[in-house]
Image: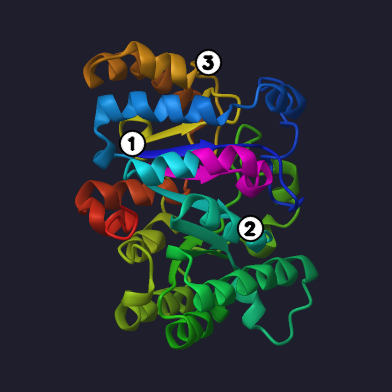
Amino acid sequence: MIVNWLLTRKCNLKCSYCGIVRNSETNIYPSIKEINEKEISSEYVISTIKYMNNLYGKNNLFHIFYGGEPFIVFDKLVPIIRYCNDNNIFYTIITNGHFYHKVLELYNLTGKIKGLSVSLDPIIFSKDDDDFDRVSKSNKAMELIEKNHQFKIIDDLVIETTIDAKNYIYLPKMVEYFKTKYPEVKISITAYDAPKSIFYDFSWYEGCSKFVNEYRLSKNNEDLEHVLMSIYKYNKDNIHCPETIPLLLENISSTYVDCGLYKNTITIDSDGQLRLCLRIRGQINIDALDLFSRHYSLYSLEKELELPFKNNYDKYCSGCNWTCPMMNQVSQNTFQEEVAHCSLRK
């Protein structure tokens, strides 16, 4: 079970495609102000993890701590990571890479950082690109990667890279660079896909729609297939969960994929409410701590979640092509050690 935690909606960046820091474009969701006022505490997160351990078994759970930017709520993050380290719980932290000093401080305060993923755009390997926002954001990530190479404070450092129609041609150069200079770093590859409706609040529907035709990967792209399959064939050892690459090509052309929802993935928003998934808040209207504290069996838990998730799925999920369904397919057919790098994150 993958557990996605939005520890906060706050972020130091205002990326044009990101909706998680903005008010929703639909009036069915609460405002960012309302969500931020109800932001969950470290005690809330730790208590929920304890109840989930009792239900699922801690070795069957993998926690991903998102934002916003989780290092903005550093005082909340520290006790959560300390608890995870002390209790051998699998986790990773997703960051934009702008807070290396906080990463180092977290290591000093907790003694260990099992997993950390940082965003990096292949566009920085283009000598001609003048997209300042994309390049400057990735330069910060490169600084973090270099410092970690020197001081080795992160057990498992993964690069999160999203390929699109403008940057995928630089992916082979990026993979070769890290294979040579930073072989300890793995690269996770996902594909850019625009949100299908205003309900996809992880991405900004209006903002994305302005450049969707420019960035969206086209179906049956032979150059893209050659790039990805060459990496899969010759540089598989440098890719995080390489089994997702063939699935990535399939899903770019697909209109339906089974994501598993609450049976394989649980997402908890920064106000403690269950989300339909990482990308879509939906209207589940169930508090996570309350839910997991009330159940003593997975059967009763899944029975409670079955109807609200089905109703939300039917209403909000049409045409979804995000990467989480692919990860679900991999996780159903792969040992957890391979999926989550758990041998490094114990």
Q: Is residue 275 visible?
A: no
What residue is rendered at 50% in x and 59% in y?
Answer: 117
Disc nearest the viewer among 2 and 1: 2
Q: Is 78 contained in the magenta span?
A: yes
Disc 1 crowd rating (10 Å Cα; few below 14, some 14-19, many 20+) is some
Q: Which mark is residue 38?
A: none
Circle 2 is placed at which residue position?
96
> Mark 1 belongs to which amino acid?
Gly
Q: Secondary structure at mark 2?
A: loop
Count the marks: 3
Q: Which mark is residue 260?
A: 1
What residue is rendered at 54% in x and 24% in y?
Answer: 272
Closer to the camera in the image, 142 or 257: 142
Circle 3 is placed at which residue position?
285
Q: Secondary structure at mark 3?
A: loop
What residue is rendered at 64% in x and 27% in y?
Answer: 39
